[in-house]
Image (cartoon, coloured by chain):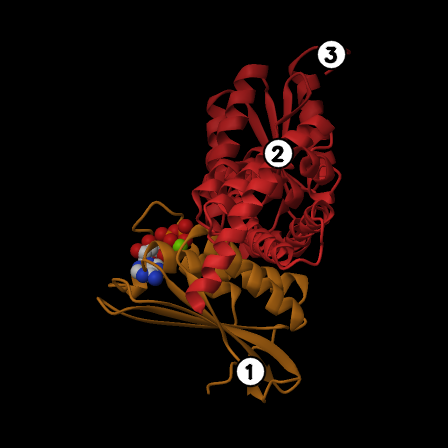
Chain colours: A orange, B red
Amino acid sequence: MTAAPGSAVATCLPVGSDTDLTWVRQQIRQVAAGLGFGLVQLTKLVTAASELARNTLVYGGGGHVEITPLERGTIRGVRLSFVDSGPGIHDVELAMTDGYTSGDGLGLGLSGARRLVHEFELDTAPGRGTTVTVVVWTADLPAARPGE
Amino acid sequence: MKVSEQEAVASAARELGVFLERRKEQIARRWADAPLFRAVFTDSRDEAVEACKAVVDALSEVASAGSPEDIAAPGFDQVREQLGRMSGSRTRTGAGPAQIADEVAALRAPVVELLRAEATDASAPEVAERVLALTLLMGTLRLVVMRTALGSGQELIARQREELLEVATPVISLREGVVVVPLIGTLDSARSQVVMESLLESIADRGARYAVLDITGVSTVDSLVAQHLMKTVDAARLMGAECVVSGIRPAIAQTIVHLGIDLGSVVTRATLADALAYALARQGVDAAPDAGAP
Ligand SMILES: Nc1ncnc2c1ncn2[C@@H]1O[C@H](COP(=O)(O)OP(=O)(O)OP(=O)(O)O)[C@@H](O)[C@H]1O
Ligand SMILES: [Mg+2]
């Protein structure tokens, strides 16, 4: 129990190649399993991470992901930040639309990832890069979302 | 002082070089029984002896050049490839770098023995100098082996990755008309390409009407994997084969739904057995029952 209430040490992994994506998925899976995530929550977390990390690689031109274990009372969770300094997203609303892709994807990565996580924050500016931060808790919390 | 010390080492090394050349046969015979060579050349002792001789030749040349500590000595060039193959083969049979290093170090003792046995006075200073030169030389050999071992380790990983791409996507022909592809691990774009190609090829070769894509072994199904699956299903359809996707585990099914992926156009079954039953039943409907073997 090295974790101070709220957060513990963050891990930072590079996202620069397909091999990195595999590694990122594996590491996040391991962290989440260690925090006591059940199979469904774990699968949702890893799948969301897979989407966001691939966007970081494909559209952001590579970057990194920060993995931070969280604790709120007795509930544990994990925060993932996907950071790139690529071109940024010009039209966030459009990018978050189901089925929109500027490449040849299904256009479900961003919008789908948002549905898989408890908290979702997108910080982007044209020319300055993109950071997507998500939080997933080990269990689905009652609908009330703390406003921080 | 320093210079003459170096000179002493160099001249002892040159004498050692002559000794190694002269006693090559005996050294090779002893080394052939050492774990390093014995474990690599399991088929034929003669082959082991030949490999040993090549290493003694190289050591003799390096020693004769008077620089037993030179890891880049040209003398090593002729055996570098052989040493790489040997350490690669040891690695494949489960020996770690530390063990390989120990096995190389163990080659020194039999040579020291021969060196001492040959001297009229084993405690003479020139014998001690030759043993020192030999110790330096064998230390250098160990470094050379470790370098090639690390190099071939990386090569090995890259090659195993390539092999896995092939091996992990076998297309199994169950019986005429039905092929099964058990997918394993990560379905990245490279893997998907291999899967698609080998599947389409076998559909064409075997005239398959049904293909089962089993994803039980796929750890993550995200939008890219789903897209690859759908493209594969479409391509198979163009070739006249219907695909059934099986092995979608409950957690993955829930995740796919949240992602918003619509697999509605794809026939899915919970397990591989269900998918096969489906394909075989349909097969039976399509054609007269075939009592024959696969
Ligand atoms: N990190 C990023 N930097 C710049 N643009 C991005 C980034 N992430 C997403 N986008 C833009 O948002 C669009 C939608 O992203 P989303 O992940 O939803 O779909 P996609 O990646 O195109 O396809 P899919 O993820 O379904 O394979 C992308 O096509 C891209 O234009
Ligand atoms: Mg995407």
Looking at the rendered structure, the secondary structure element under dot 2 is helix
Nearest the camera: B198 or B233?
B198
Which residue is under mark 1? A8
In which quadrant will I find the C terminus of chain B? top right
Q: From this viewpoint, is residue B52 visible?
A: no
Which residue is under mark 3? B290
Q: Is residue B2 shown left or right of residue A72?
A: left
Q: CA distance from mark 1 to mark 3?
A: 63 Å
Nearest the camera: B143 or A117?
B143
In which chain is the residue bearing label 2?
B
Q: CA distance from mark 2 to mark 1?
A: 59 Å
Which residue is under mark 2? B53
In which chain is the residue bearing label 3?
B
Nearest the camera: B186 or B64?
B64
Q: Is residue A15 shown left or right of residue B204?
A: left
Nearest the camera: A125 or B270?
A125
Tally of marks? 3
Amino acid on which the number 2 mark rests in the picture: Lys
Q: Give the residue drawn at x 65%, y 37%.
A: B23
In which chain is the residue bearing label 1?
A
Depth check, mark 2 against mark 1: the one in front is 2
Depth check, mark 3 against mark 2: the one in front is 2
In which quadrant will I find the N terminus of chain B? bottom left
Q: Does B40 appear above or below A56?
A: above
- Outermost residue, left side: A127
Amino acid on which the number 3 mark rests in the picture: Asp
Ligand 1 quarter of the rendering:
bottom left
